[in-house]
Image: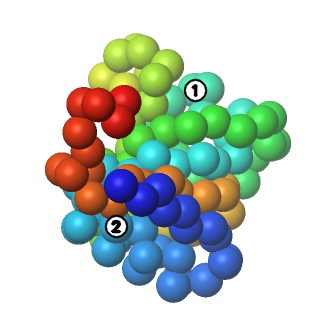
C-alpha cells in the first residue's frame, strides 16, 4: 500500500491530475481553503465560485467531475449543498485547492495491516 499526494501548482496540470486520479481511484480526499461563501450553499445554490473571504481549511471528498467543475461531498450534513454534495468550479478549484491524498493498491491491503 502506498499513500500518494498531489499538490496544487496553480496550473491546469493540477486539474488534469485530479481528473486522472478520479478515473483511477474513483474518489480522492482533498484539503482546501474554505471561503465564507461555502456556508451558504443549499439545494438551490450548490456551486462554489472563486473569491470570498478565506476562513480556514477543510477536508472534502472529490467524487467526480464535469466540464463545469469538481463534484465534492462535504461532511457538513444533508442540509448543506445538494444533500451534502456541491460543485467547485474549476477556477475556484485552482484558487482553493491545497492537496489531494489517495491510497494506491487499496485491494492489496490486508486486515492484519490495519
Of the 4 image quadrants, the one containing the N terminus is: bottom left
Tell me: residue 6, above or below residue 76: below
Tell me: residue 23, above or below residue 111: below
* Mark 2 nearby-residue class (10 Å; few <14, some 14–19, many ≥20): some
**Within the image, what quadrant is residue 70 found in?**
bottom left
Count the numbered circles shown.
Answer: 2
Q: Which residue is mark 2?
A: 21
Of the 4 image quadrants, the one containing the C terminus is: top left
User: Closer to us: mark 2 or mark 1?
Assistant: 2
SS at circle 2: helix
Q: Residue 32 location, x and y as percent? A: 63, 48
Tell me: residue 76, above or below residue 6: above
Q: CA distance from mark 2 to mark 1?
A: 29 Å
The structure residue drawn at horizontal position 62% and vertical position 67%, both measured from the top left corner, is 7
Dot 2 or dot 1, earlier in sequence: 2
Q: Is residue 96 visible?
A: yes
The outermost residue toward the left is 107
The structure residue drawn at horizontal position 41% and vertical position 79%, both measured from the top left corner, is 16
In the shown orientation, is residue 29 left or right of residue 40?
Answer: left
Residue 40 — which label? Answer: 1
Q: Is residue 45 visible?
A: no
Residue 111 — which label? Answer: none
Circles 2 and 1, Cβ within 8 Å, touching? The answer is no
In the shown orientation, is residue 94 left or right of residue 111?
Answer: right
Amino acid at each position: 500500500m502506498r499513500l500518494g499526494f498531489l499538490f496544487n501548482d496553480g496550473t491546469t496540470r493540477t486539474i488534469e491530475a485530479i481528473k486522472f486520479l478520479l478515473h483511477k481511484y474513483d474518489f480522492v480526499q482533498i484539503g482546501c481553503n474554505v471561503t465564507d461563501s461555502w456556508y451558504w450553499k443549499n439545494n438551490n445554490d450548490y456551486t462554489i465560485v472563486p473569491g470570498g473571504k478565506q476562513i480556514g481549511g477543510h477536508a472534502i471528498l472529490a467524487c467526480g467531475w464535469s466540464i463545469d467543475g469538481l463534484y465534492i461531498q462535504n461532511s457538513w450534513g444533508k442540509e448543506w449543498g445538494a444533500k451534502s454534495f456541491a460543485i467547485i468550479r474549476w477556477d475556484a478549484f485552482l484558487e482553493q485547492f491545497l492537496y489531494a491524498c489517495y491510497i494506491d493498491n487499496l485491494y492489496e491491503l490486508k486486515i492484519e495491516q490495519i
